Image (cartoon, rainbow, N blue to C red):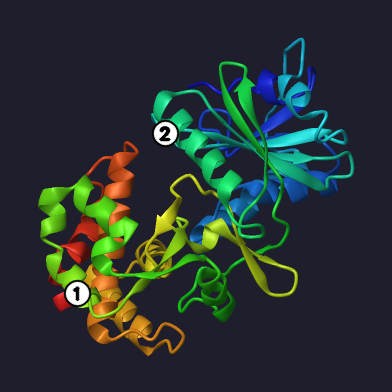
């Protein structure tokens, strides 16, 4: 899917692409120095090497080293889509996802002074559209304050778009252990009283989805059968780069496309550990599993035994593995193989 810049920028806008026009990830309007510097921070980067690369790209953006092109179009469809809800909308920064069937475009919307007014997600292809519709459903049902507010969903150009309010705050560090405020935030995800494992909707859904694989996790469910477990909202991609620190040390989460309203408690917290360990620390599955079990069993607010912590670690890896398969990701990527080593049990037993 080639990015139609005329959909997102007003006619005649001068635009630069980072890192370049051959492999663009971020499109920016050419505005004042300070605004270009601020908007170029939207370029994604978590690990140190990536952050250093982003710094260089931002320097290129503000010093005029990047190639500039002019948008040729006759109308600004994004502006028409959002104008009644965001009348001060003046410009946009366009972040393009990976080139695949699940590719989406995320648009940061700003006013004339560079203040963030909101975000828009756009999808054209089938799987990406399905995920975007699901995110709209989740945002519309979330308790207030957990995620952004869904302002509008509808057709835009050849695709569908979700307009959202912004979550204003600073990025979380990509470090372990999770901050206390992150754990506090997850505690607020509980929505229903505890139920027995065999009656929990997440367990029933998991057993029904993949009978053969889930049968291999029977010992995990047995380890959790000693007590009742609440039903909780589950983000599904709960990682530091999808969270922000809001004023007052509160936390907010965005990118809810993998979310569910009837999830199992603590799986998001384990996922946070797994993603950070795999993608930032580059730990082995065995080292990660040992760390996760130790952390969970020692965190007093969770009140988990070692057996329960081990079960939740395996189940979180299994849930992530199958969720990414469900949404069109291939099975044998390095990260999927890494997750499989944990949920199959060998890494947890190491």
Position of 10 relative to 320 (above/below): above
Q: Secondary structure at mark 1?
A: helix
Q: Where is residue 281, by image quadrant? A: bottom left
Query: Most extreme residue toward the top, as rendered?
Result: 74
At a point 22% along the width and 82% down the height, the residue shown is: 307
- Judging depth in this view, the residue of 128 and 99 nearest the camera is 128
Question: What's the distance in space between the residues labelled 2 and 1, CA to CA?
Answer: 31 Å
Q: Give the crowd class for mark 2: few <14, some 14-19, many >=20 residues within 10 Å.
A: many
Label 2 vs 1, first from the N-terminus: 2
- Judging depth in this view, the residue of 137 and 48 nearest the camera is 137
- Judging depth in this view, the residue of 74 and 123 nearest the camera is 123
Q: Position of residue 8 (x, y in %)?
A: 69, 26
Look at the image and tell me whether residue 335 can be seen. Answer: no
Q: Position of residue 285 (x, y in %)?
A: 24, 68
Q: Position of residue 198 (x, y in %)?
A: 23, 64
> Circle 1 is placed at which residue position?
348
At a point 57% along the width and 39% down the height, the residue shown is: 19
Look at the image and tell me whether residue 193 can be seen. Answer: yes
Q: Secondary structure at mark 2?
A: loop
Q: Position of residue 206 (x, y in %)?
A: 25, 53
- Judging depth in this view, the residue of 75 and 50 nearest the camera is 75
> Circle 2 is placed at which residue position?
102
- Mark linked to residue 76: none
């Amino acid at each position: 899917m080639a990015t139609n810049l005329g959909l997102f920028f007003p006619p005649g806008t001068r635009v630069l692409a980072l890192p370049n026009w051959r492999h663009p990830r971020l499109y920016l309007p050419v505005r004042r120095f300070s605004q270009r510097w601020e908007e170029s921070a939207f370029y994604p980067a978590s690990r140190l090497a990536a952050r250093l690369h982003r710094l260089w790209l931002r320097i290129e953006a503000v010093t005029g080293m990047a190639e500039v092109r002019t948008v040729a179009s006759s109308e600004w469809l994004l502006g028409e889509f959002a104008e009644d809800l965001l009348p001060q909308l003046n410009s946009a920064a366009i972040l393009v996802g990976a080139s695949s069937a699940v590719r989406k475009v995320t648009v940061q919307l700003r006013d004339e002074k560079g203040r963030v007014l909101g975000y828009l997600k756009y999808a054209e292809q089938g799987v990406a559209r399905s995920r975007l519709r699901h995110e709209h459903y989740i945002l519309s049902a979330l308790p207030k304050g957990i995620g952004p507010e869904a302002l509008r969903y509808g057709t835009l150009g050849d695709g569908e778009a979700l307009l959202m309010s912004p979550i204003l705050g600073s990025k979380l560090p990509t470090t372990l252990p999770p901050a206390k405020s992150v754990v506090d935030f997850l505690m607020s995800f509980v929505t229903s009283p505890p139920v027995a494992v065999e009656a929990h909707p997440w367990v029933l859904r998991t057993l029904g989805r993949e009978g053969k694989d889930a049968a291999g996790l029977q010992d995990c469910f047995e380890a959790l059968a000693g007590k009742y477990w609440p039903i909780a909202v589950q983000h599904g991609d709960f990682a530091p780069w999808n969270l922000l620190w809001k004023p007052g040390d509160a936390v907010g989460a965005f990118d809810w496309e993998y979310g569910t309203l009837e999830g199992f408690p603590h799986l998001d917290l384990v996922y946070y550990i797994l993603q950070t360990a795999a993608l930032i620390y580059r730990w082995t599955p065995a080292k990660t599993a040992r760390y996760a079990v130790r952390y969970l069993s020692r965190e007093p607010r969770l009140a988990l035994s070692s057996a329960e912590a081990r079960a939740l670690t395996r189940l979180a890896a299994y849930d992530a593995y199958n969720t990414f398969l469900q949404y069109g990701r291939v099975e044998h990527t390095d990260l999927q193989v890494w997750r499989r080593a944990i949920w199959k049990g060998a890494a947890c037993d190491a």
